Image (cartoon, grey):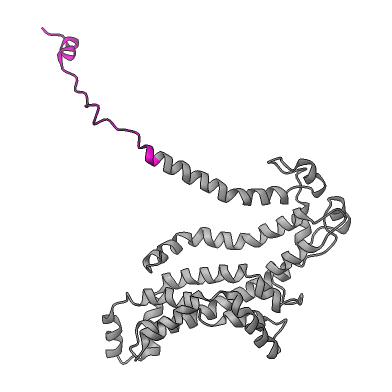
Amino acid sequence: MVSIQQTLNATPVLRMPASRRKRVNWQRVVAWTVLMLLILVTLFPFYWMLRIALSDNRALSANASSLLPADLTFGAFKRVLGVSSLEEAAAQGGSGAKISFWRYLANSVLTSTLITVCQVFFSAMAAYAFARLRWAGREKVFFLFLTALMVPPVFTALPNFVTVKELGLLNTYAGIVLPSLLMTPFAVFFLRQFFLGISREVEEAAILDGAGHVRIFLRVILPMSAAPIATLSLLVYIGAWNEYFWPLLVGQDESVRVLTVALGIFRSQTPQSGPDWAGLMAATLLAALPVIGLFLVFGRRIVNSIQFSGLK
């Protein structure tokens, strides 16, 4: 009787040809390596900001090349949040100047929110007119409207400043938000691309039910456009939050000063030995956290909506 071992030895072993074996995709490996390096290069400035924010100002110069915080302390964050005494700030080499962080943060939230709500709503109205309404010269007017994208914002800063000054709106919230309150070419183009893809049958059904253009816009178009409107709102909010030049021109008063301007003024104030770099980095990190959080939550939606709208 043939043993089991003999049967196994007699059975031919099937081996895959060398050409069928799984090969290492070196192009994929190189692509991922380059991508990881780019991510590290992008995130390194944030880590360096955190390292300086957690350092003592007096120890920074002696440990300039170290990757770890110099004399680890949370004193910079305490100074920014206003819970540190003047003696503690001086002991850590910090600035004796105060930064009303919560007031400036509230001003930034107020102005950014107001700009976002109004600009997105009025831009949606204009995009609806360009995409869904039929009127003579629509395409030509839209082309002229888009040419405003080629005008640098610095060219309109002086006329806007003169207008705001003549209206007596300097050092007011209205003066800060007025130039960005209405529609912008990018926002109109962004929403128009999506509105063009909405089926005409939905609009015609609403017209048969007796709905006018205002009701169609509010009850049909806007609910169907929730995703691109949310994406545009996030983009507008980030842009308004990071705005520096215009609030610096018209919002010098401390009662309406936004956070970006306050950080620039805080940088210019020199304590005993030099700028309070730790305090400045701590304030910058705290100011960037809301925007970073929003982008981490809605980042994928931004990319998907931009691709859907045909922007390259």
Q: Residue at x 27, y 30 (%)?
A: 21
Q: Residue at x 43, y 61 (%)?
A: 303
Q: Residue at x 72, y 49 (%)?
A: 52
**Closest to the observer, 90 or 60:** 60
**Closest to the observer, 221 or 167:** 167
Is 217 magenta? The answer is: no
Residue 119 position in % (x across, y down): 52, 79
The answer to whether 80 appears left or right of 186 in the picture is right
- Find the residue positioned furthest to the left: 1
Quadrant assignment for the C terminus? bottom left
Residue 100 position in % (x across, y down): 76, 67
Q: Residue at x 63, y 71 (%)?
A: 109
The answer to whether 93 appears left or right of 182 in the picture is right
Residue 207 position in % (x across, y down): 30, 89
* Residue 129 seen: no
Quadrant assignment for the N terminus? top left
In the depicted structure, whether residue 265 falls above or below residue 117:
above
The answer to whether 196 appears left or right of 162 in the picture is left
Q: Main secondary structure of the magenta part?
A: loop
Q: Which residues are magenta?
A: 1-28
